């Protein structure tokens, strides 16, 4: 079963992103309808673009996900530490 995840990303500074999970929808059309509603709200209306592709941009993005399936990080992860 496929579902559609709606998120919004805002770049704070130097590639530091603030990503907001907005919901899971049964169809892409429902995710797009929710995006249209949220795009009128404070904050979101400043970055209302729908992102299409893998480039780091600001705005909404919708991804297709499959229920009961691992969608990422199948090989695990590592932590990178940096100094500020």
Image (cartoon, rainbow, N blue to C red):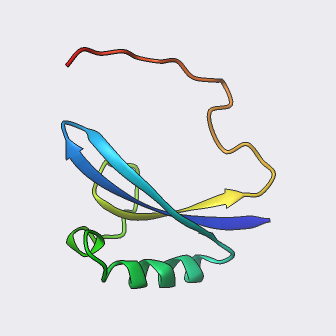
* Residue 7 image point, x, y percent: 46, 61
Query: Residue 53: x, y in percent?
Result: 40, 56
Q: Quadrant of residue 64?
A: bottom right
Quadrant position of the N terminus in the picture:
bottom right
Q: Give left or right: position of 5 versus 26.
A: left
Q: Is residue 9 above or below residue 71?
A: below
The residue depicted at 68 percent of the width and 31 percent of the height is: 74
Q: Residue at x 25, y 67 (%)?
A: 47
Vertical order, 24 against 58 (above or below): below
| Residue under the point 77% across and 57% down | 67
Q: Position of residue 8 (x, y in %)?
A: 39, 61
Horizontal side of residue 76 vs 13, given as left or right: right
Work out whether 73 lies above or below 53.
Answer: above
Q: Looking at the rendering, which quadrant does residue 44 occupy? A: bottom left
At 39% from the left and 78% from the top, the residue drawn is 38
| Farthest residue, direction front | 42
- Count up the numbered dots: 0
């Amino acid at each position: 079963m496929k579902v559609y995840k709606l998120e919004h990303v805002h770049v704070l500074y130097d590639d530091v992103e603030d990503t907001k999970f907005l919901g899971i929808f049964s169809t892409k059309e429902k995710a797009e309808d929710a995006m249209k509603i949220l795009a009128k709200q404070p904050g979101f209306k400043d970055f209302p673009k729908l992102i299409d592709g893998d480039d780091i941009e600001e705005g909404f993005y919708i991804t297709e996900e499959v229920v009961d399936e691992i969608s990422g990080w199948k090989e695990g992860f590592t932590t990178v530490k940096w100094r500020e």
